[in-house]
Image (cartoon, rainbow, N blue to C red):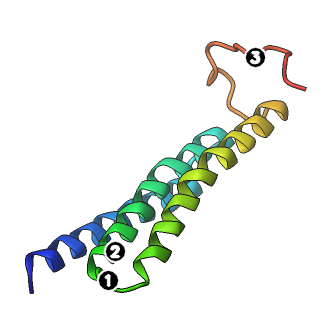
Amino acid sequence: MTVWQWISGALILFGATLALTASIAIVRFPDTLTRMHAATKPQVIGLILVLAGAGIELLGHGNVWALVLVGLFTLLTAPVVAHLISRTAYREQSHRDGLLTVNELGDTID
């Protein structure tokens, strides 16, 4: 095995571990806002690491560009989805009491 294969394997393993911990956190966390945090940050970073590891392994093939497109699409859509989920959770007040110490939105959300 070459050094690049070791790096690729480490990236894939670390990314898969992050994705696994994110999926466990989605099941275990108590409310929508904490689940949303677990669904976006470690999940996206884990996917990017897995894609980077696969990209290193597939270097020189045409399939690498598909991995780049998947990564870009994920980086563009995950913040938008997280914003919409958190906004809906705020509107429906499905968060724990005392979680939001400063309420900057007040009654301004339509």
Instruction: Name which residue type carries label 2.
Output: Gly
Count of number-bearing discs: 3
Nearer the observer, 38 or 1: 1
Instruction: State the SS at label 3.
Output: loop
User: Mark 3 sits on what residue?
Assistant: 105
Q: Nearer the viewer, mark 2 or mark 3?
A: 2
Residue position marked by numbered label 2 in the rendering = 55
Query: Of residues 12 and 53, which is closer to you in this image?
Result: 53
Q: Quick one: label 2, few (<14), some, or many (20+) residues within 10 Å? A: some
- Disc 2 to disc 1, C-alpha distance: 5 Å
Labelled disc at residue 13: none
Residue 28: in sight, yes or no?
no
Kindly identify which residue carries mark 1: 58
| Cα separation between marks 2 and 3 | 42 Å
Asked whether the viewer can see residue 47, the reply is yes
Q: Marks 1 and 2: in contact by CB < 8 Å?
A: yes
Q: Quadrant of residue 108?
A: top right
Callout 2: helix, strand or loop?
Answer: helix
